[in-house]
Image (cartoon, coloured by chain):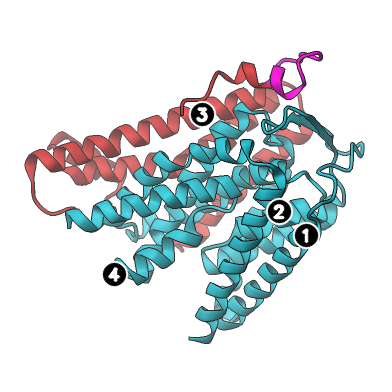
Amino acid sequence: MTPASPGDSTRRSLGGNRPRPVEAINRLVHRVLMIGLAISATLLVAGLVVWAARGGLLPRSVTGPVQALRDIGGLRPVGFFSLGLLALILTPFARVAGSVVIFLREHDRRYATITAAVLAIMVASILLGRA
Amino acid sequence: MGLTFFLILLTAIVAGVFGSMLGIGGALILVPVITLFLGVPVKTAIGASIVSVIATSSAAQIGYIDRGITHTRLGMVLELATTLGAIAGGLTAVLVSPRALQGLFAAILLWAAWGMRRRRGGPESTGPTGLLDASYTDPADGRLVEYGVRRLPLGMALSFVAGNVSGLLGVGGGAVKMPVMNIIMRMPLKAAIATSNFTIGVTAATSAAIYFGRGYVDPKVAVPTALGILIGAPAGPRIAGRLPAEALRTIMVLALLAFAIQMVVKAAS
């Protein structure tokens, strides 16, 4: 189930006789997704453990991040669930934001612009959705 | 309570495997099962389904990037078109009747199923084109597949439509994007699946953030969904990698037809 390191894939993907380093962007995407999912899964499982240990009904709605932290402090499952789901939702944002940084660092102006535009549209969508 | 939780978890595991294997997200299986059989209200189910798409996209992507199959750069170019389409869809949502949209979406899915079926037996790749050329080794037979992208402007226009429809209906971006990449842009099936999987997380994350902010995400449903997908989705890239492209194509055509039928039923009811 656990994939090998991304370094192996390029050797495979290029047929072995033409080794080329994995693109920095793929390494970054891989890393950001792993971290985001690990945080999310840990929080969700922790919430289940707390819920199983303390009993009671599952919460019906999520709370904001600040309240969620308070709930985690008070060992209330809703805090773990809210933050865990939020981590999952924010992972693609982190992936796009990280891509902008990588492309800027590589002086790849075209892709830095493209990914920055995607991030801007994502943020604008949320602001419009709230209005 | 405990039983429903467990059943949603099981459904999500299956949805995760299929969604990541086909690059279309897990909503196709998840939403009908949990609304029809597990009594989850439609609104809650949509919130959970958006969460499931993010989880499928992220978990599957780890496997596809490892296998070098995802075309990351093309994915980012298409994300630009899809996010624009989604924001436009959100703005015009009040102007279009949901029924007309579902009908339109069903028609697009039928076109996609027909187009995918027609291409069976043909070569997986039509070779490099000089535009965004890429390559990967097909894990099924160890062959190196080299390809380029064709008709990028049309592909982007249709990705805009895909974003538009998914922004309006809350589902289905991947079911349009995957076939567009394969049929229009002539990407090999597995690259199209991996890259479609890559892009769907972005639109879904945007919708999910809005849902989350409004408090529409119900942990009772969203938590077992997310966990189930995280368990199931990593298997998708392994299965998709090993299956011959033709078998994958057949499963895909059936899935698109099933999705189209769902949409027709919804539009008619």
Q: Nearer the viewer, residue B126 or A96?
A: B126
Residue that protrudes farthest toward the right in the picture: B130
Determine the residue positioned at 56% across, 68% down: B258
Is residue B30 depicted above or below B234 in this figure?
Answer: below
Residue marked by disc 1: B157
Q: Chain of mark 1?
A: B
Q: Amino acid at mark 3?
A: Val
Marks 1 and 4, Cα distance to the nearest angstrom? 38 Å
Q: Chain of mark 4?
A: B
Residue that protrudes farthest toward the bottom in the picture: B268
Task: Pinpoint residue A49: horizontal percent, then vertical percent.
Answer: 17, 37
Would you call the spot at circle 2 few (<14 residues within 10 Å), some (14-19), or many (20 or more)? many
Task: Pinpoint residue B74: horizontal percent, then vertical percent.
Answer: 74, 41
Q: Chain of mark 3?
A: A
Q: Is residue B87 visible?
A: no
Q: Which chain is cyan?
A: B
Disc 2 vs disc 1: Cβ atoms closer than 8 Å? yes
Marks 2 and 4, Cα distance to the nearest angstrom? 36 Å
Magenta segment includes A19: yes
Tell me: B264 left or right of B9.
right
Respond whether the residues carrying marks 1 and 3 are from the same subunit: no
Residue marked by disc 3: A32
Marks 3 and 2, Cα distance to the nearest angstrom? 23 Å
Residue marked by disc 4: B39
What's drawn in magenta, residue-wise?
A: A10-22
Q: Amino acid at mark 4?
A: Gly
Q: Which chain is red?
A: A
Would you call the spot at circle 1 few (<14 residues within 10 Å), some (14-19), or many (20 or more)? some
Quadrant of the image containing the N terminus of chain B: bottom left
Majority secondary structure in the magenta region: loop
Marks 2 and 1, Cα distance to the nearest angstrom? 7 Å
